[in-house]
Amino acid sequence: MSREVPMKEEKGFTLPELLAALVILAILLGLTIPAIGSYMKHGTKAYYRGLETDILAAGRDYLLDYKSLYPREVGNSAVITLEELVDNKYVDPPKDEKGNECEGKITVVKKGRNKYDYHTCLVCGNYYQSAAKNCEYTGTNNVSKNYTINLNGELPARVNQGSTITVPTATVTELQGSETKVIDNQLSGRPKTIDTTVLGTTSVTWTYRTKKISRNVTIIDSVSPVIEGLQLRYSSGNSYSGAITNRDMTLYVDAMDYACVLGSECRNRYPNLEGSGIKSVQYKEKNDADWTVYNTKKKNPTVVIQKTVWGELQVRVVDESGNSSAIQTIQVQMDRDIPTKTAVSYISGSSSNQWQNRIQLKLTATDNVAIRYYEIYKDGAYYATTGDTWTPPNNFSSNNVTFRAVDVAGNKGPFSDSQRIHMDIEPPTKPTINLNGYASGAWTNKDVRQTFSARDNVAVHSYEFAYDSPGTSGTVVSNPWIITTDGQWTIYIRAVDSAGNKGPWSDPYVVRRDTVKPTCSLAVVNVPSTVNGYFTSPVDIGFAEAKDNASGVRGTTIDRPFLDTTTSITGEIVTGSVTDNAGNSNLCKLSVKTDMVTPNLNAKVNPLLLKTEDYTFSNNINATFGPTGGQVTCNPLSSRRQGVYTVTCTALGNNGRMKTTDFLVRHSYDAVGNPCHKEVTFTCSNPRNCHQPSSESWREGTVCTYTCTDGKEREEVSRYKCDVSSSCPTGWGGVGNEWSDTEMQETTCYSCPSGGTLNDKICTY
């Protein structure tokens, strides 16, 4: 009997529990991260300490090889730079953790007989530096050496592949004072030998301490490749038969690029050594300037030839060093070039949508070999072939004819531009003429509109006209044809169709047109007398000229043929009209001025009163005249200066007509004036400045100002005092009172001599 075990209730973490867990993790991380950092730092230091160890070992080896570099006396030191150790291949260039080269040195200090201390200094930028004391040492017995390295033999700069070459040794010398000391006369270069079977450049270096020299040796391929076989095949694989073709062909080339020339010692030593290798196969026709290049690395390449080769095909191979094989040739007649686009010109006729009755075309195309024939296509479908000229057959009609050339290899050129060709040799019918209301042979001054009608098997293209008699040639005319010029013609019309076929001439008809107005001018025909351009007697007016240049005068009219009245100063306009047989009318006008007025006159003043001055009596006349004017004369002409008398004046017009009038004249004179005196009485009133400021009483001794009747102002001094309401003494007045006085004034006295009567200042008799 089994027992069921009750499941525990599963619960999540509480917030305090989560916080406690996070605190524990933080403590663990705080302990772990410094440890990791210390480990990484310790690992980096170990790397640089290893570099120091490598440099120290290299320095020891270098001094063993160059014992003369040890310091000679106890306490002295010598310095070997890291650069010197690297240049002499004792150690590889040390680099920091970022790959940058470090700097450094080895300092050796003599401590006793055959006892030396070594101090390594390594500086790798900001990443690492040896202890400061190791880097502070300086050499005490180092002397700058003047070394010279000279080769003991020649080392060529370029050597043919497979040749034998020996790297010479070098001699190292040191200049000590004025003497040259040999340090080493068998200094080997690095590398000591060069493999001449491998193409490329090798740098040989001879190094002694800080002095070194280098020479470059380049192994070159100067041997040309060879073609050991050529063959042409069709794309099917069959060998080329030599016939003319336009198919692609494949050129099979058997080529080899040996490093050594056949029969040479090098070839015997390296019989199968290859040079730089095949780079390309090149081919061209014999007379071509440029080669077609096919790049390939294969020794037995196949080249598909897709260009025209006609005659001798030249082939060569070129290796990677630019060496070219001898040229091999093969004969081929392969034409892949199509003829040029056919150009179409017309020996007669032209390309158009219109019908023509004579067409011959010239077809022209060029080909690198030769044109065999031309194909003709009508509306896109093959029609026929032809040579380089073609005449379409009768009744040939197409909206789209093209041509293309075919060469001897069967290559077909591009189609020519489309030509539109229509043939028609049937002329139109004899036309009928419609003059649209105009009667043949009649004169008119209107435009003559003519319309023509003819039939054609295709379409009438245009109409031609001829004058007087029909001939073989005509002039193209529009339909309708509107004659807008003057003249008279006998006209013939014929129709021309789209192909240029011309129908028979129409029956003749006559057109007469005159739009020139007849001449018209008026003149005075009775020649009456004139004054200043005015006729002074009745006028007869007629035509001076009335004629027509073409159709002739049909009638004339004048609106005022006779004038017997006076006109205005601008004259009277007389209008004439002349009409010709074509209906043209012309107006002409004549300005006529006439003066038939009797003058009129009257006196301005009657009687006329005159003094002693002279006076022209015509000045006292108002006179009117006609447009020609006139003049006035009086009898007597001027004043006689005495008595009373009658003057007779006559107005005479320039047209010969006159009228008379009379007026009375009486004479008078100015009186004579002489100086004289007379007594004048005046009255003064309206005194001012006489009253007291605070009352209306008057004070004695006040200066009073009066305005007098003669316009003057006079002053009086008051001698009395009085009230306004009382009367004032004589000779002194108050408000509202006045006083009078007399005085003598100078004036003029007038008189009439010779017994005349004085009237004011005028003397009359």
Image (cartoon, grey):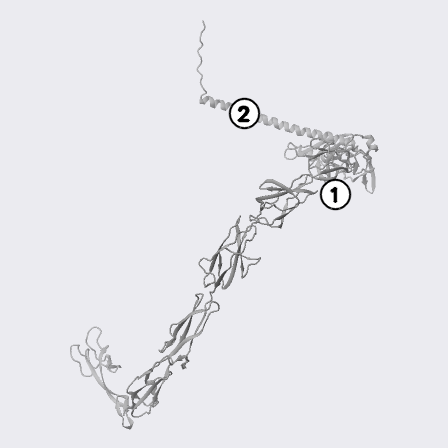
Farthest top residue in view: 1
Mark 2 falls on what kind of element? helix
x, y percentage for residue 241?
74, 34
In this orientation, which residue lies closer to the viewer: 636 or 755?
636
Dot 2: within a 10 Å radius of its alpha carbon, few (fewer than 14), some, or many (20 or more) residues? Answer: few
Mark 1 falls on what kind of element? loop
x, y percentage for residue 271?
80, 30
In this orientation, which residue lies closer to the viewer: 88 or 615?
615
In this orientation, which residue lies closer to the viewer: 469 or 80?
469
Query: On the image, numbered disc 1 is attached to which residue?
Result: 287
Q: Look at label 1 and name its amino acid.
A: Asn
Please state, as top left, top right, bottom left or bottom right, where the C terminus lies in the image.
Answer: bottom left
Query: On the image, numbered disc 2 is attached to which residue?
Result: 29
Q: Is residue 250 visible?
A: yes
x, y percentage for residue 166?
82, 34
19 sits to left or right of 75: left
In this orientation, which residue lies closer to the viewer: 712 or 199?
199
Q: Is residue 296 visible?
A: no
Badges 1 and 2: C-beta atoms under 8 Å apart? no
**Label 1 – label 2 distance at C-alpha:** 87 Å
Q: Look at label 2 and name its amino acid.
A: Leu
Q: Quadrant of residue 727?
A: bottom left
